Amino acid sequence: MRYLISICGLLLVFGLALLMSKNKKEIKYKNILIMLIIQFLLAALLLNTKFGYVLIKGFTNVFDHLLSYASTGITFVFGGLANEGEYSFFLNVLLPIVFISALIGILQHFKILPFVMKWIGLLLSKVNGMGKLESYNAVASAMVGQSEVFITVKKQLDKISPQRMYTLCASAMSTVSMSVVGAYMTMIEPKYVVTAIVLNLFGGFIIVSIINPYTVEESEDILKIEDEHKQSFFQMLGEYIMDGFKVAIIVGAMLIGFVALMDLINSLFDMILGVSFQDILGYIFAPIAFLMGVPWADAITAGGIMATKLVTNEFVAMISLGEVAKSMSAHTLAIISVFLVSFANFSSIGIIAGAVKGLNERQGNVVARFGLKLLYGATLVSILTATIVGLVI
């Protein structure tokens, strides 16, 4: 019965994507089927095999070491700020982003990251039936972030059609950047973070192939990666360190505002209606959670966390998940954890539109116009990934 419900969930995802499709005749069903099979195989490999365990364990160990190195710098500057034995979200989760950002800058500076992104993107383009630019962009978004990725292709922005811009932006919203992966791993199980990153990459292509199908002409399928403007090593390093610190501060400020507002709204709803705002959202999203494979006993709570992520951001939702995780089944925890690992929320519309507009005003206005459709598609990607995980575990 559980499998039948999840299959219905998959059909719902594809049905909702088809509902918004601009040109159903151009949908490449063969490529979609291949990518869906790849998703199932990767989910099974990562979550159900010893090889997947070893792979994720190795990935986790790398980030554990990186976080320990980051802790050295944080302790040097902020040592004694937190009481001994106390946990500080800002110090333990957000500030390590500064160090990870510095590492990304070093990999960019020595052309290691651009090389990896380009060739993985070219390989993916053979599978997804899309252009080289779209494939590169999806990989690059997962490496450098949803706003920074557009800097690497700014030479081509002015010539990109609205259809291709939708694909680029949807990929950016469906993934997460490596700079925050370490932060996620301190909040939810690392295996779900890794699984979500990999599955979302293909899920983004699947949903976009349905909602926004098109064919890229050979003459248009050119990939021009923008080189970083010439800087000395230490100029670059200082810039990336400051960028990482800005991200940590911005995320921290958003969390202060969103968590406080959510608490206020919950209190007001509880006083007036006798039920919290998150509980109401939970009832709205509960059927979707149920079709993703969440048992009905957990569906309302899970639905509230899903909605929290949509209206605020994934960090707020992960905090909410941590508060109720012990009351959930392991099956529910896996599904919802995977669902949360993406940038699919309302604030991302403004982030992406603003990033593109800073590079090309005309294209920024184009992105702003299809903002809600962008969020719609990225949310379907998260639901698709979570449903697949629910079927596999």
Image: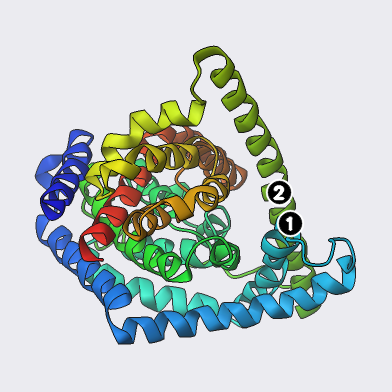
Q: In this view, does 108 lie above or below 80?
A: below
Q: Residue placed farthest to the front in the image?
A: 327
| Front in this rendered view, residue 372 or 248 | 248
Quadrant of the rendered image containing residue 341: bottom left
Instruction: Please tell me whether mark 2 sits on a helix, a strand or a loop.
Output: helix
Q: Mark 2 points at which residue?
A: 252
The mark found on residue 90 in the picture is 1
Q: How crowded is mark 1: few (under 14 residues within 10 Å), some or many (20 or more)?
A: few
Which dot, 1 or 2, sits closer to the camera?
Answer: 1
Local secondary structure at mark 1: helix
Q: Earlier in the sequence, mark 1 or mark 2?
A: 1
Q: Which amino acid does label 1 sit on?
A: Phe
What label does residue 152 carry, if any? none
Q: Is residue 123 visible?
A: no
Horizontally, residue 270 falls left or right of residue 7, namely right
Task: Tell me what residue is drawn at x 71 percent, y 62 percent.
Answer: 244
* Residue 101 to residue 13: above or below: below
Residue at image point 18% right, 41% down: 12
